[in-house]
Image (cartoon, rainbow, N blue to C red):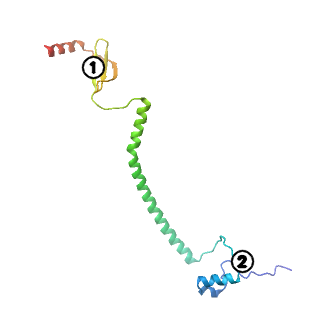
Amino acid sequence: MANDKVREFEIGDKYDAQLSIQTPDVIKNTLEGVAYNVVNDSYTKTLSEEEVTERRKQLANVSIEINDIEEEKKEVITEFKERLAKPLSDKKELLSTIKHKSEYRTGNLYQLDDQENGFMYIFDEEGICVDSRLLKPTERQGRIRTINQEVSNG
């Protein structure tokens, strides 16, 4: 006996043309009445052209919404980056200060020369020696300084 069986339904066929004009509840009740079993499972449904057009509209709307959210995200990220800039800079400076046990400052420095030993000592505004170096050749003017001191004292 050859395969004499003929399929009664093809994918996309309706169970009954009369069901097309019925409410969803009537369709569901009719199918439950004739079904062998009812299972809840996932499946693939072929869409009509109208349904595909509707999905395209939905895609456009979702794409616009995503774009708006992405733009808002960029603005928020920019705002957070701006807010983080100063604390991150402070953190970097503090880490460097702790690591090197010193910090970079700007202020008046007082250079005191030691002509006898050939050194220039640099003091900060608190009177703390922050650096020293050899006198430059142009700074070795002990005679002029002595004359200047005599004039100011005299």
| Residue at x-position 43% and y-position 53% | 77
Looking at the image, residue 19 lies above or below residue 59? below
* Residue 140 lies in quadrant: top left
Left or right of 134: which side holds 48?
right
| Marked residue nearer the N-terminal end (2 or 1) | 2
Q: Which element carries disc 1, helix, strand or loop?
A: strand
Q: Is residue 101 visible?
A: yes
Report the residue marked by disc 2.
37
Q: Residue furthest right?
A: 1
The circle drawn on residue 32 is: none
- Residue highlighted by disc 1: 112
Residue 154 in the figure: left or right of residue 138: left
Depth check: give the residue in front, 83 or 50: 83
- 56 to 77, vertically: above or below: below
- The residue depicted at 41 percent of the width and 52 percent of the height is 78
Q: How far apart are the alpha carbons under marks 2 and 1?
A: 102 Å
Q: Amino acid at mark 2?
A: Asn
Image x and y of residue 88, in percent: 41, 42
Which quarter of the image is occupied by the C terminus?
top left
Tell me the quarter of the picture where residue 138 sits: top left
Q: For mark 1, does the 10 Å Cα neighbourhood hold few (<14), some (14 to 19), or many (20 or more) residues?
A: few
Identify which amino acid the numbered label 1 is placed on.
Answer: Leu
Label 2 secondary element: loop
At which x and y percent is residue 65?
46, 65
In the displayed structure, 77 sits above or below 146; it is below
Q: Do we see residue 135 in this rendering? A: no
